[in-house]
Amino acid sequence: MSVPTPQADSVLVRAARRQPVPHTPVWFMRQAGRSLPEYRAIRADVPMLQSCRTPELVTEITLQPVRRHGVDAAIFFSDIVVPLQAVGLDLDIVPGTGPVVARPVRERSDLDRLPELTPEHVPDITESVGLLVAELGDTPLIGFAGAPFTLASYLVEGGPSKNHERTKALMHGDPQLWHDLCARLAQISLAFLRVQADAGASAVQLFDSWAGHLSRADYLRFVEPHSRAVLEGMGRSHPDLPRIHFGVGTGELLAQMAEAGADVVGVDYRVSLPDAVERTGGRYAVQGNLDPALLFAPWDALERRVREIVEEGRRAPGHIFNLGHGVLPATDPDVLSRVVELVHEVSRR
Ligand SMILES: Cc1c2[nH]c(c1CCC(=O)O)Cc1[nH]c(c(CCC(=O)O)c1C)Cc1[nH]c(c(CCC(=O)O)c1C)Cc1[nH]c(c(C)c1CCC(=O)O)C2
């Protein structure tokens, strides 16, 4: 039997596997980003997607929050639309808006612009992950991809959307095209995760940020099979890598998202960790669930909430401390560092 590397036997990976840990692991979604002055400096003259495709920049930006906050994991600096651009789709990330697609995907012929992803499309990703894993020492790297529904929403709407009306119209109006589109996106996401895993990532997270906009019935019929294809595909090729499945406003979908092939289910601030554990039958680790807005509250109030979450997490089969969604750009980075310290201190056993 091969001996696991320190990254593969790290506190984060152990918590995800529901094994005993010396303390609760903590990292933050969007820990690399505009809350950090060193990030704003390095990104000053480089467009977002260009920075994602430049290995030296990806490495430096991914490491910044690890150095500064002492978090228990790095998350690969990239974006959910990077693999779509890599296969040739014309899109951009517009500051303050998000991903914008030049020609939205709405007809069968549009699928021709979305070929399958192979490692040859993303040699820079392999290189970036390799550089990072060498630099990170004992700290594990979390690889990630967008889930088919969240990616489809950007492609069909042409950009960020409040109501996802064109996406839902396509889903119900032409289910065959919808399923073919999502099957293609599942292939792209799975291949993108496999590239990161092959290059040395120690865990993966599937971001279905907008799944909370769906009814359970629609989620099960139109979305779950495709997310399952990604998660189970990773389980087949990389059985040792924990799989985290994340969404926002998904309190009513937690059981379905866990059972789609995850080891860890992401929980936002709307649902308590004990409720999340109950809803998922006590069989899954949980990740969350500090409200990112609370990082702006007085320290006393924030400290109370952090202690409460750590205590609630102790009763879960496994707990990874995180926010319910990403770090807001105006967050004081010193507060994030204090939260990391506090989580480690109060959870130490
Ligand atoms: C929906 C989504 C996107 N991208 C992502 C998601 C899923 C997670 C979530 O729900 O937040 C995933 C993502 N995007 C980014 C990461 C990096 C890793 C991390 O530190 O968490 C991750 C995991 C970097 C980024 N991705 C983006 C930024 C900001 C770009 C900048 O700094 O100029 C970063 C650091 C851009 C982006 N990309 C996207 C949006 C909505 C935006 C914000 C646009 C804006 O407000 O300017 C699409």
Image (cartoon, helix red, strand yellow):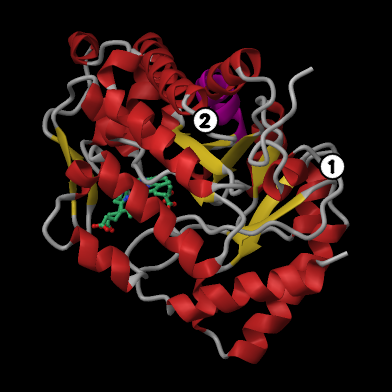
Lower sequence index among marks 1 and 2: 1
Residue at the spot of label 2: 200
Q: Does the magenta stretch include residue 218?
A: yes
Q: Is residue 332 above or below residue 67?
A: below
Q: Depth check: give the residue in front, 240 or 251.
A: 240
Residue, disc 1:
19
Q: Is 221 within the magenta? A: yes
The secondary structure that dominates the magenta segment is helix
Asked whether, in this view, residue 237 is left or right of residue 264, the answer is left
Query: Label 2's element?
Result: loop
Residue 176: which quarter of the image? top left
The correct choice, above or below, for 175 with respect to 133 in the image is above
Tell me: 326 left or right of 126. right
Against 35, is 234 above or below? above
Q: What residue type is labelled 1?
A: Gln
Image position, residue 242 (x, y; %): 66, 33
> Where is residue 3, by image quadrant?
top right
Residue located at (88% from left, 64% from top): 349
Query: Disc 2 marks which amino acid?
Result: Gly
> Is there any visible trace of residue 317 in the rendered image?
yes
Q: Is mark 1 on a helix, strand or loop?
A: loop
Q: Specify start and end residues of the magenta stretch as a single range.
A: 216-226
Tell me, yes or no, if residue 166 can be seen here.
no
Residue 27 location, x and y as percent? 58, 57
* Residue in view at x 14 percent, y 53 percent: 46
Q: Which of marks 1 and 2 is in front?
A: 2
Residue 155, image quadrant: top left
**Residue depicted at 24% across the width and 9% down the height:** 108
What separation in Å lies between label 1 and label 2 (alpha carbons)?
Answer: 21 Å
Mark 2: few/some/many CA within 10 Å (<14, 14-19, 20+): many
